[in-house]
Image (cartoon, grey):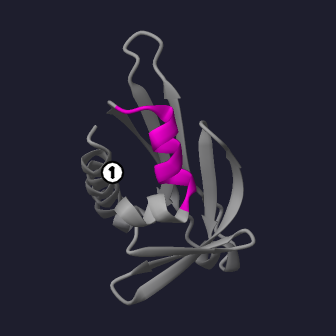
Amino acid sequence: MEQKIKFEQEYLLKTSPKILNNMLMSPSGLSEWFADDVNIKEDIYTFFWNGSEESARLLSKKNNEFIRFKWIEDEEDGIDSFLELRFKVDPMTKMVVLNLTSFAFEDELEEVQLYWQNTLEELKRVIGA
């Protein structure tokens, strides 16, 4: 079975950890920049986009620090992957540093990286960063 390739991206945001925490941890925050709508039932987050949906299991989270998911489809296919959004305040610049860790198949890597760049630009726009 083909495995996914891990990649990381880093973004500097002019915002507060409290605002970013809400945008990453809550269904209402996630639906402002990541998906059209988000539902949570126990540890399963269901994301809705233009009539389609994907579900992810919450693996772990720590307020004002990170959230980590595993897509249910990858879980069912036995693919070792996750999606993590981790953030901290840079002590020098006082800006929030957001680190994205995700995975993609080799033939989709550039497309997925571009998707995340565009999606995180939308997050920046929404929070005014």
Q: Which residues are magenta?
A: 15-26
Tell me the residue at 28%/37% (across/down). 129
Where residue 106 sits, quadrant-wise, is bottom left
Tell me the residue at 38%/23% (across/down). 95
Q: Position of residue 61 (x, y in %)?
A: 68, 48
Work out which quarter of the rendered image holds the N terminus and state it: bottom right
Q: Is residue 103 above or below residue 16?
A: below
Q: Label 1 sits on what residue type?
A: Leu
Q: Position of residue 15 (x, y in %)?
A: 37, 33
Can residue 107 be seen in this snapshot?
Answer: yes
> Does the segment drawn in magenta span residue 90?
no
Q: Position of residue 77 (x, y in %)?
A: 65, 78
**Residue position marked by numbered label 1 in the rendering:** 123
Question: In the orientation shown, which residue stands out farthest toward the bottom?
Answer: 51
| 33 sits to left or right of 47 | left
Q: Is residue 83 above or below residue 11?
A: below
| 125, 53: nearer the viewer | 125
| 6 sits to left or right of 82 | left
